[in-house]
Amino acid sequence: MKDAKQIIENYKAEYQQYLGNVPDYVMENDEAGFYERLGFATIDESVLAVEYKFAYTSGGGLVQRSFTVPMTEETIAELIKILESKLTTKAFAKEQRTLMTKKLREFIKQRDHFTCCNCGNSTAVEPNLLLEIDHIIPASKGGRTTEDNLQTLCWKCNRAKSNKIIS
């Protein structure tokens, strides 16, 4: 909005050199009409309002809800605060752990042949071995829940590793 107003003001200033001397009477009593007749838009910020509309429709289409949020400077500042809080290390780690699905765990174990990537113990040798999926770079240190950052460890090795980065 501010940028648009500035662009219009710059055009007005440029046009002044081509207009010559506009009588003071016109500029004092009808400046808006004068510029409107030249094709300049008048921006009234009180009329314009930016809103973000949220809408929800249930899968069956029976339930519908919607609401709007006015995007004022205060609302945007509050939104920034909320987003910043979500970007903390603790929140990031929590989010990454929620991405660890049962299907992903089973895939990593299969990929690693049900064998601990640290000590080499496997369920083939020890059928009751408890295998866990570990973040190579821990989520608490910025590691993501992606296949290339996950490994299979036995419970002893996983406890020993904890949240260390071992190279």
Image: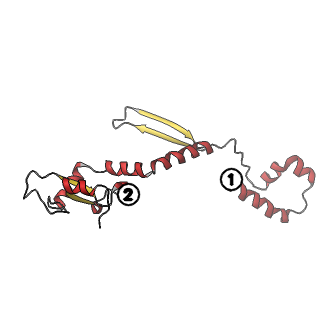
* SS type, badge 1: helix
Looking at the image, which residue is at 28% across and 63% down?
148
Q: In the image as oriented, which residue stretches furthest toward the bottom?
A: 167
Quadrant housing the C terminus: bottom left
**For the residue carrying disc 1, how many other residues have a C-alpha within 10 Å: few (<14), some (14-19), or many (20+)?**
few
Residue indicated by mark 2: 141
- Whether residue 70 sits left or right of residue 157 in the image: it is right
Considering only vertical position in the picture, is 143 above or below 66? below
Looking at the image, which residue is at 89% across and 49% down?
28
Looking at the image, which residue is at 85% across and 48% down?
30
**For the residue carrying disc 2, how many other residues have a C-alpha within 10 Å: few (<14), some (14-19), or many (20+)?**
some
The amino acid type found where label 2 is placed reads: Lys
Residue indicated by mark 1: 2
Q: Which mark is residue 146?
A: none
Residue 154 visible in this rendered orientation of the protein: no
Residue 61 lies, in percent from the top left, at 37, 35
Considering only vertical position in the picture, is 15 above or below 41? below
The amino acid type found where label 1 is placed reads: Lys
Residue 120 lies, in percent from the top left, at 15, 63
* SS type, badge 2: helix
Q: Nearer the viewer, mark 1 or mark 2?
A: 2
